[in-house]
Image (cartoon, rainbow, N blue to C red):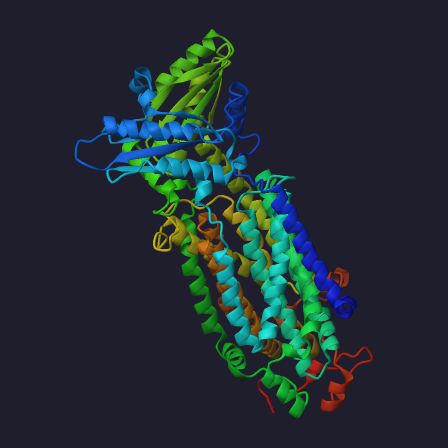
């Protein structure tokens, strides 16, 4: 690592130019090719996927996205959508929409025949005050152009008046509700800049972590856009990658710059300090970043193409931020030179020379306080984590719909208007796809249709439509409950396990429950089934890494418990806000609803990596002190005093970046932002600086116990090797050094907290 830092320092201008050229090149390529993100949640082999495959086979031309234009009369009592003035106004608007680029067809309620109306599928509500038209685009949602969709929105809403409200809903229309700006990133970076300025006292030093993270994350963001043309990449993947990348990128650079500044204050030259920082903290950053990448790439084991792109996108972002931290950052350190220190620090260094740093102030006092009251503080910390974890017991996974959009959005208004006028189930009808091969099968399908009409939880049923020789029939079932409701999921299960098997009995009829709502349910069920195994693998992986690094059974066991506690408590916060609705509307996050099914697996993998960062930076210093003194109390006290400040600063930055993404306007990203911010806050301020050191004080030497036979068989790795001492500094303060330049018996010196003199 020192060789890499030296190379980047000597060729700093070339390194900077190469990174900027990479950013510019990838950005240009992404701009020329455009984006190709996916919103396809289908899981191969599930019942909804089989239904979709049959529909594609039966109706190959129906591949475009279908959305709705909804209007509601709000004027004089008695005015309905059938009034001549309303019909003339909306018919003109619908004709204009039908002629827009990208629009395949428009089905108006004013042309629906009486037979359809008798079946209960009319597009005019029973009270006559609400109606909707269906708009079918030429392309699927993944391939729609936002500009063309926006023209549809503008044209339709132009028909609005003081007594006629016009709104639009559907996945395609949702493209116009997505935030196109980068306000959340700007706010997160601004808050991080304030924290860094306070921590460093130097504007030049403050800019380095931000510049490094922005270049690394920017390159990754554009790379993810290109990746979307090669594989399935979820539409939220770039924002999620940015969220994670900015958080860890700024933090990783913070650790390295902090070590660099420490070297300068000890009298090292800029080059020596930078080499030392990369060789120590830089090595820990590579380990931590690699851990995050491995954890996130664990999503590939789930075998879901939808999550494969998310995993690769997130790991690519982390990989590039780590690369920028150990290459671009040393080059920038060489550019700013001594300005990494504040003016006061440079003046003090010039007047008094290098001064040994001792942990003092709040960090030292807090460390001593934890040592004096470990039982009390451990109990308080455990109580906090348990209370916050309580909502997790009611966690319900499911895919939210446009009823969870902010109340001011046109998609939310359209959703509510349809729910009020026609019933909540119209927003998410089920498609029963029946494959018949003979007359007996068709008779059974007709009987199934009659049975569905009397099934509890079903509001209406549309008679099956046929294709070809009648081998495929489609029955549309409208539930009495909303798409995201538990009652709708129960209805789907009832149809699949009770109603349909009875209809198929004794025939060759094959019936599948499909549609968007059923597809979301299948996606959630598959993920829930794989979550325990995935969580176990991730936690076990972390345990093995810590076992090898710290040669102890106690450290990885506590880390596993801490990881589970952080996950449970952060999920509790997410459930309270998004599922219970505590403040979600006030924060502009929309109505309460289920938690996205992919949130647990992604958060678990990301949180594993982030918590490993803090565990490594905290325990590695304790372990170093333990090896030198074999005094557990001193090791824990010194390790906490020397690392808590940088961990807390890093946590504040990461929390600020994560919370800023609540402003993105995307409910899914807001879930990740709040969940990750809560997890980092609890991990840094409750677990790593309170519960972990308190437990380590209580366990004493058992923290570091490892059977001799296992110790002999484990490989030996060093995450963050002891820092080398420059000969000038050693001579100044009388520090004895080993031939390799490291301080000899550094751990045996006077206790820097209890014996500050």
Relative image position of residue 53 (x, y in whole percent): 54, 25
Number of marks? 0
Relative image position of residue 634 (x, y in whole percent): 61, 79
Residue at (68, 83) in percent of width and height? 266
> In the rendered image, is residue 129 in sight?
yes
Does residue 31 lie above or below 247 as drawn? above
Does residue 485 lie above or below 186 as drawn? above
- Residue 285 or residue 455, whichever sits in front: 285
> In the rendered image, is residue 458 in sight?
no
Residue at (52, 11) in percent of width and height? 437
- Residue 180 or residue 60, whichever sits in front: 180
- Residue 148 or residue 530, whichever sits in front: 148
Classify residue 329 as left or right of residue 513: right
Residue at (35, 31) in percent of width and height? 93
Does residue 598 lie above or below 653 as drawn? above
Classify residue 625 as left or right of residue 427: right
Q: Which image quadrant: the N terminus?
A: bottom right
Q: Which image quadrant: the C terminus?
A: bottom right
Image quadrant where residue 69 sits: top left
Relative image position of residue 713 (x, y in whole percent): 76, 60
């Amino acid at each position: 690592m020192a060789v890499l830092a030296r190379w980047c320092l000597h060729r700093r201008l070339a390194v900077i130019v190469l990174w900027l050229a990479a950013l510019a090149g990838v950005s240009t390529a992404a701009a020329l090719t455009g984006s190709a993100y996916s919103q396809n949640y289908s899981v191969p082999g599930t019942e909804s996927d089989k239904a979709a495959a049959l529909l594609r086979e039966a109706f190959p031309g129906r591949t475009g996205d279908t959305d709705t234009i909804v209007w509601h009369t709000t004027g004089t009592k008695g005015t309905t959508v059938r009034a001549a003035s309303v019909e003339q106004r909306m018919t003109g608007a619908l004709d204009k929409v039908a002629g827009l680029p990208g629009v395949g067809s428009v089905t108006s309620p004013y042309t629906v025949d009486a037979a359809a109306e008798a079946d209960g599928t009319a597009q005019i509500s029973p009270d006559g005050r609400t109606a909707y038209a269906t708009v079918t685009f030429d392309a699927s949602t993944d391939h729609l152009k936002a500009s063309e969709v926006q023209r549809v929105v503008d044209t339709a809403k132009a028909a609005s008046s003081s007594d006629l409200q016009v709104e639009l809903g559907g996945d395609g229309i949702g493209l116009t509700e997505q935030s196109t700006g980068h306000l959340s990133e700007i706010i997160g970076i601004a808050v991080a800049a304030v924290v860094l300025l306070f921590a460093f006292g130097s504007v030049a030093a403050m800019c380095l972590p931000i510049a490094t993270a922005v270049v690394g994350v920017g390159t990754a963001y554009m790379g993810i856009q290109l990746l979307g043309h090669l594989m399935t990449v979820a539409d939220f993947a770039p924002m999620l990658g940015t969220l994670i990348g900015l958080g860890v990128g700024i933090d990783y650079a913070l650790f390295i710059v902090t070590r660099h500044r420490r070297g300068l204050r000890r009298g090292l030259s800029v080059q020596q300090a930078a080499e030392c920082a990369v060789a120590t903290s830089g090595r820990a950053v590579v380990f931590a970043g690699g851990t995050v990448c491995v954890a996130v790439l664990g999503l590939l084991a789930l075998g879901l193409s939808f999550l494969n792109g998310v995993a690769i996108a997130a790991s690519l972002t982390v990989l590039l931020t780590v690369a920028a931290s150990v290459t671009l950052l040393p080059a920038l350190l060489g550019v700013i030179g001594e300005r990494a220190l504040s003016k006061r620090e440079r003046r003090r260094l010039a007047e008094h020379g290098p001064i040994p740093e001792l942990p003092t102030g709040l960090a030292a006092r807090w460390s001593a306080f934890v040592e004096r009251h470990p039982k009390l503080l451990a109990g308080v910390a455990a109580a906090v984590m348990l209370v916050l974890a309580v909502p997790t017991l009611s966690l319900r996974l499911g895919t939210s719909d446009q009823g969870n959009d902010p109340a001011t959005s046109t998609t939310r208004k359209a959703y509510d208007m349809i729910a009020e006028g026609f019933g909540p189930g119209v927003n998410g009808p089920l498609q029963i796809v029946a494959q018949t091969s003979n007359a007996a099968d068709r008779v059974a399908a007709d009987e199934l249709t009659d049975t569905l009409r009397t099934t509890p939880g079903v509001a209406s049923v549309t008679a099956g439509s046929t294709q070809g020789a009648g081998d495929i029939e489609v029955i549309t079932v409208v539930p009495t409950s909303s798409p995201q409701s538990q009652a709708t999921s129960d209805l789907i299960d009832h149809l699949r396990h009770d109603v349909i098997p009875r209809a198929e009995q004794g025939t060759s009829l094959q019936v599948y429950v499909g549609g968007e709502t059923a597809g979301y349910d299948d996606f959630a069920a598959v993920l829930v089934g794989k979550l325990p195994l995935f969580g176990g693998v991730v936690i076990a992986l972390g345990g093995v890494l810590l076992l090898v690094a710290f040669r102890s059974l106690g450290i990885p066991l506590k880390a596993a418990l801490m990881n589970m506690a952080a996950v449970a408590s952060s999920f509790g916060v997410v459930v309270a806000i998004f599922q219970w609705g505590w403040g979600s509307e006030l924060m502009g996050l929309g109505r309460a609803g289920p938690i996205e099914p992919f949130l647990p697996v992604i958060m678990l993998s990301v949180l594993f990596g982030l918590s490993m960062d803090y565990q490594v930076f905290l325990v590695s210093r304790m372990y170093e002190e333990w090896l030198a003194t074999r005094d557990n109390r001193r090791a824990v006290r010194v390790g906490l005093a020397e690392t808590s400040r940088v961990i807390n600063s890093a946590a504040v930055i990461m929390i600020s970046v994560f919370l800023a993404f609540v402003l993105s306007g995307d409910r899914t990203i807001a879930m990740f932002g709040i969940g990750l911010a809560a997890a980092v806050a609890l991990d840094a301020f409750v677990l790593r600086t309170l519960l972990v050191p308190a437990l380590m004080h209580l366990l004493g030497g058992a923290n570091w116990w490892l059977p001799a036979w296992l110790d002999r068989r484990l490989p030996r790795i060093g995450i963050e090797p002891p820092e080398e001492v420059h000969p000038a500094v050693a001579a100044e303060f009388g520090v004895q050094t080993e031939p390799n330049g490291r301080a000899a018996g550094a751990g045996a010196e006077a206790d820097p907290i209890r014996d500050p003199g």
